[in-house]
Image (cartoon, rainbow, N blue to C red):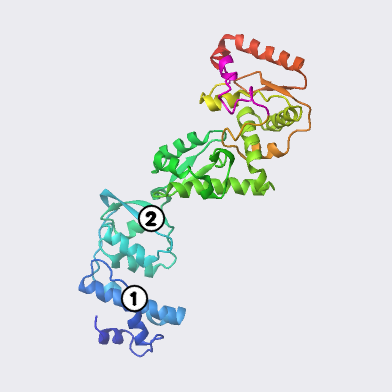
Amino acid sequence: MTNDEFESLLRGETSPIPVAEQEEQLRRQSPPPRRSGAGWAVFTVVLVLVGALVGGGFWGWNQYGQRVLDYLGEEEIPDFAGTGAPPEVILVIESGDIGEDVARKLSEEGVTASFESVYQILLQDTSITFQPGTYRLLSEMSAQSALDAIANPENRVIYKVTIPEGVTLAQALEIIAENSDISLADLEQATSDPTVYGVNPEGDSLEGYLFPATYTLEPGSSASDVIAMMVDEMISRLDGLGIAPDQWHTVLTTAALIQREAREPEDFYKVSAVIENRVADDMLLQFDSTVTYWEKTHGTVWTTDEARANGDNPYNTYVYPGLPPGPIGLPGDIALDAAINPAAADYKYFVTVNLQSGATVFSDTLREHEAAVQLLGEWCDVAENRPYCE
C-alpha cells in the first residue's frame, strides 16, 4: 500500500501523530513473519492505526477505525480452516507479551497461516487478553481456533505438585521431580546451600524449611526458583505467627515432631504439651519418629530395641536428651501453631491405641501410660487389626 493510497483512505483528516513519529514507530517494529505484499500493506495500516490510537484515543478509532477494518476486510489474508491437526505445538506466552507478540509466535510456530489473520481479530475485539504461560496447541489452526484454544484453561500446561505435611525433604524432592520437568539431581543441588534462600539452619539442611502445600509450577521453572518459593512460603508462615528468626529452627524442629506424632488437630497441641513437659523435667522424649527418621524406615510406628539403643543416630531421642538437632520432616500450619501454643496440661506420655483411626491416649503418669499401652496390645490382638501392627 503506497502513502498516496493510505492518505486517500484517511482523506480529509489530519493524523494525530506526525509522519516523522509514525515512521520512527515503524522502524522500531520487528517485521511480521510470512509477509506477503498484501500482508505488508495490512501491517503498515495496523501500525499507523495504533500510532493514531495512542495519540488520539477513542477519537482516533472513531475517525479511522472502521475504514481501516473495511480495508482489511478487502485484503486476502492467509488463514487455515478448522481446529488444526497434529503435530502438537507448545506455545509460550511470556509476561509482557502483547497481541502483536502472540500473533507473531502463532505464525512462526506454524499454528496459524499468517500474522495478519490473528492480528485482524485482535483489532476487532480489543477485549481479548493473554495469560502468560505455556499452551498446548495444534498445527494449522484457523486464527479464531488458535485464540479460542489459548483462552481455554484446559490447554494450559502447568504442573500441580502436592507436598503432604510430614514428609521429609528427600521425599518432597522426589515428589517434585515425579510431577514436573525438574530433575531430582537439579533439586538436590538446589537444596545443597540453605543460605542461598536467606536461612542458616543448624546442620546446613533445609529439612523442615519447605512449606508443605500444593504448588503450581510453570514448565521450564528452575529447581532453585521452586525451592525458593517453598522456603519463602514457610518463612511467611513463621512471620505470620510472630516467630523471630532466631527461633525458627527450634520451632520447626518441635513442629516437625508434632506433625509426625499427631493425627487429630486437637492432639497436635497435646503432643506439644508432652514435648514441653518432658524437656522441662529433663526426661528423654523417646519418640519413635526420631529413630525412624534416621533409619529411613518411614511408614511404621514400630522400632527395634537395637534401633532405640543406637547412639550413632544423632536424632535418637531414646539416647539423647532434649530436642533432636533439627526437624525430621516438613510441618504444616497446625503443627507450627501447636509448637508455640502447647495445651495447658501436665501430659508427659501418649500412645496411639487405634492405629487405624489414630485415636490416642494422653497420660500424666507412667502408670496411666502403661494401662494405655495395654489397650494398644489388646487392639493389635484382634485379627483384623494385625496388618496395622506389623
Q: Amino acid at mark 1?
A: Arg
Q: Which mark is residue 28?
A: 1
**Closer to the camera, 239 or 103?**
239
Q: Quarter of the image containing the N terminus?
A: bottom left
Quadrant in the picture for residue 251? top right
Determine if residue 298 is in view. Answer: no
Residue 136 position in % (x across, y down) = 34, 50
* Relative to 7, 266 lies left or right: right
Q: Which mark is residue 293?
A: none
**Closer to the camera, 74 or 269?**
269
* Relative to 339, 46 lies left or right: left
How many numbered markers are drawn? 2
Give the residue drawn at x 33%, y 64%: 103
Residue 280 position in % (x across, y down) = 76, 30
Check disc 1: other Cα within 10 Å, few if <14, some if 14-19, many if 20+.
few
* Relative to 341, 135 lies left or right: left
* Relative to 341, 168 lies left or right: left
Q: Quarter of the image containing the C terminus?
A: top right
Q: Secondary structure at mark 1?
A: helix
Q: Secondary structure at mark 2?
A: helix
Quadrant in the picture for residue 36? bottom left
Q: Which portion, as a residue range, is magenta?
A: 301-321
Which residue bears the numbered disc 2? 150
**Are the two marked residues, 2 and 1, in contact with CB atoms closer than 8 angstroms?**
no
Quadrant in the picture for residue 362? top right
Q: Amino acid at mark 2?
A: Ile
